[in-house]
């Protein structure tokens, strides 16, 4: 898949929050294990995180799962397998699930196995992105572009930008998010203490 296809069919993270009916907690635990295992059999499923209730008086579960492409998520969502699992869920929950879909920069700011799914404020995301991006651009331009001197300038810039985006997504931002978690997610940190 080339870079333009990836822009049209990006990786996707979905967070689903459900409130469980009192007395149905054990049945819901079995349900969530089953639907997660079923989703893992579908192409492009990258894993799931289950966040259990912090307060037993508020039995709210959050399930976060990732797919490598939006198109693979759609295959799962439109499957008969998923429809059967969703039909089982209705007797176990109160109200409707709350679904959040993350595809943009906010996925750079996801802590693994964290209860902080709501993205941080935009000014914080912008600040951390700037702190990470500025030196990375300088480093890539200094070390990488000289190897491409024989290519046209536009192609050099295209390759340097592609490398920068890959490094930001898979190397730099996961580390920056962990380093600055105290500032990005102060509320969730206080809740865990």
Image: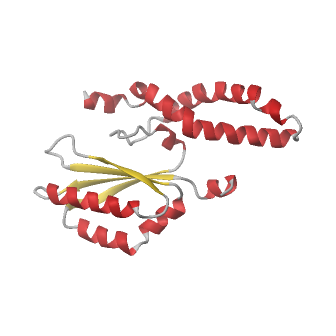
Residue 13, image x and y in percent?
Answer: 45, 51
Left or right: 113 as drawn, with respect to 18: right
Left or right: 106 as drawn, with respect to 133: left
Return the residue found at the far left. 23
**Residue drawn 42% across the image and 25% down it:** 183
Q: How many marks?
A: 0
**Residue drawn 47% across the image and 68% down it:** 75
Residue 190, image x and y in percent?
Answer: 28, 27
Rendering colour mode: secondary structure
* Residue 161 against residue 142 in the figure, above or below: below
Quarter-wise, where is residue 91 in the image?
bottom left
**Residue nearest the observer in this picture, 62 or 98:** 62
Return the residue found at the far bottom. 80
In the rendered image, which quarter contains the C terminus? Answer: top left
In the rendered image, which quarter contains the N terminus? Answer: bottom right
Quarter-wise, where is residue 172 in the image?
top right
Residue 93, image x and y in percent?
Answer: 21, 60
**Residue nearest the observer in this picture, 168 or 190:** 168
**Residue drawn 54% across the image and 42% down it:** 105
Left or right: 122 as drawn, with respect to 59: right
**Residue drawn 55% across the image and 27% down it:** 127
**Residue nearest the observer in this picture, 23 or 145:** 145
Residue 99, image x and y in percent?
Answer: 37, 55
């Amino acid at each position: 898949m080339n870079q333009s296809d990836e822009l049209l069919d990006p990786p996707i993270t979905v967070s689903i929050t459900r409130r469980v009916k009192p007395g149905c907690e054990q049945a819901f635990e079995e349900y969530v294990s089953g639907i997660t295992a079923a989703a893992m059999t579908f192409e492009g499923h990258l894993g799931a995180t289950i966040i259990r209730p912090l307060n037993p008086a508020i039995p709210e579960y959050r399930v976060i799962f990732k797919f490598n492409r939006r198109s693979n998520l759609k295959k799962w969502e439109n499957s008969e397998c998923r429809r059967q699992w969703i039909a089982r869920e209705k007797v176990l929950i109160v109200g409707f699930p709350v679904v959040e879909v993350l595809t943009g920069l906010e996925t750079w700011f996801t802590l693994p196995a964290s209860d902080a799914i709501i993205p941080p404020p935009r000014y914080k995301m912008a600040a951390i992105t700037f702190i990470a991006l500025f030196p990375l651009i300088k480093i890539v331009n200094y070390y990488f572009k000289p190897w491409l001197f024989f290519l046209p300038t536009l192609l050099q810039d295209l390759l340097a930008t592609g490398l920068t985006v890959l490094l930001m997504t898979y190397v730099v931002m996961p580390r920056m998010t962990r380093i600055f978690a105290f500032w990005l997610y102060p509320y969730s940190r206080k809740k865990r203490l």
